[in-house]
């Protein structure tokens, strides 16, 4: 009897472990997409957007960004513009227009990474597994890949509504690229539907509902390519707000000497 009970106990434990282990790819995905954000952090990256149906300039944007975040502030430069922040202020510097915008800052240091996407936490693993399936998980030499595919399909189709992919260095588990694909239906006229339905690039991306409603499947892709990830100890960012503006004798902020040609606009509290 004791032997049977022990076998049942072990079998039950194995099944429970197997169930828990199905979350392993999701835990790893969260780990890779979040751990590099630990402060202090220095990042250099390329940000790319693309779409099979371009509706605005943002759909084809290509930017290079450099960031340095630490406890006392942050410095971000992107496409020539600068964003500097400390506990009190956020300063945006635009060299093209020779303008500076000074705002009160109510955002935490960690929140300044939100343009990279919402930070995933360990507690979000079950929710991630409820929304996505593991489509692919493989290792190619020193590079590994995890692809998650949305469990939800677009209406009237079997096409997943979205996809997320991370490629990373297998040993250090530092990310190389993070790719996010969003899909949605765009209603079009029957004439537009017929004009694109036969094109190779639109195969599988057109939808007809009872020959009365017509849609195109719009795919929007955003890619973050990491050139450099560092965690050098630093209490201050490499460029501070005081390197761009300073208080004058009357207590008003003015651009410093090297930026005297800039116009400073201070936003209301």
Image (cartoon, rainbow, N blue to C red):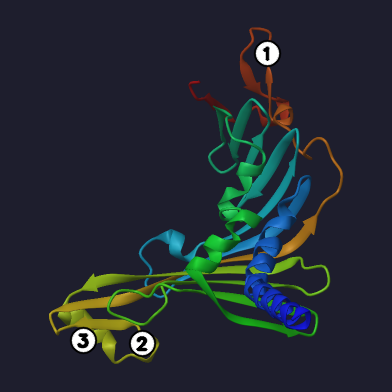
**42 relative position to 199: left or right:** right
The numbered disc on residue 194 is 3
Classify mark 3: helix, strand or loop: helix
Using the numbered discs, state the Cα–Cα distance from disc 1 to disc 3 in whole angstroms: 66 Å
Q: Position of residue 6 (x, y in %)?
A: 76, 78
Q: Nearer the viewer, mark 1 or mark 3?
A: 3
All told, the count of numbered labels is 3
Q: In terms of depth relative to the viewer, which is nearer, 67 or 266?
A: 67
Q: Are marks 1 and 2 in contact (CB under 8 Å)?
A: no
Q: Nearer the viewer, mark 1 or mark 2?
A: 2
Q: In terms of depth relative to the viewer, which is nearer, 202 or 58?
A: 202
- Residue under pointer 1: 248
185 to 233, vertically: above or below: below
Q: Position of residue 235 (x, y in %)?
A: 82, 36
- Residue under pointer 2: 204
Q: Residues within 10 Å of mark 2 (few under 14, many from 20)?
A: few
Q: Nearer the viewer, mark 2 or mark 3?
A: 2
Q: Position of residue 4 (x, y in %)?
A: 73, 83
One can see residue 155 in this view: yes
Mark 1 and mark 3 lie on one chain; the one further toward the N terminus is: 3
Q: Residues within 10 Å of mark 3 (few under 14, many from 20)?
A: few
Mark 1 and mark 2 lie on one chain; the one further toward the N terminus is: 2
**11 relative position to 58: left or right:** right
């Amino acid at each position: 009897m004791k032997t049977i009970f022990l076998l049942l106990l072990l079998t039950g434990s194995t099944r429970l472990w197997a169930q828990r282990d199905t979350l392993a790819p999701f835990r790893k995905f969260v780990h890779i997409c979040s751990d590099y954000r630990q402060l202090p952090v220095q990042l250099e990256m390329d940000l790319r957007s693309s779409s099979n149906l371009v509706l605005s300039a943002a759909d084809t944007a290509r930017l290079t960004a450099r960031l340095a975040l630490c406890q006392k502030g942050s410095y971000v430069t992107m496409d020539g513009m600068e964003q500097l922040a400390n506990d009190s202020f956020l300063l945006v510097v635009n060299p093209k227009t020779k303008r500076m915008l000074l705002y009160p800052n109510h955002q935490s240091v960690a929140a300044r990474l939100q343009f990279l996407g919402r930070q995933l936490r360990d507690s979000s693993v079950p929710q991630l597994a409820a929304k996505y399936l593991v489509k692919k998980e493989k290792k190619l030499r020193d590079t590994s890949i995890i692809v998650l595919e949305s469990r939800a399909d677009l209406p009237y189709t079997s096409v997943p509504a979205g996809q997320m992919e991370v490629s990373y260095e297998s040993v250090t588990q530092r990310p190389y690229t993070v790719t996010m694909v969003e899909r949605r239906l765009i209603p079009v006229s029957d004439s537009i539907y017929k004009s694109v339905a036969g094109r190779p690039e639109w195969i599988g991306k057109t939808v007809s509902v009872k020959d009365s409603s017509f849609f195109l499947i719009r795919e929007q892709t955003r890619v973050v390519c990491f050139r450099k990830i560092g965690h050098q100890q630093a209490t201050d960012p490499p460029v501070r707000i005081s390197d761009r503006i300073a208080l004058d004798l009357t207590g008003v902020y003015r651009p410093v000497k090297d930026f005297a040609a800039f116009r400073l606009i201070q936003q209301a509290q």
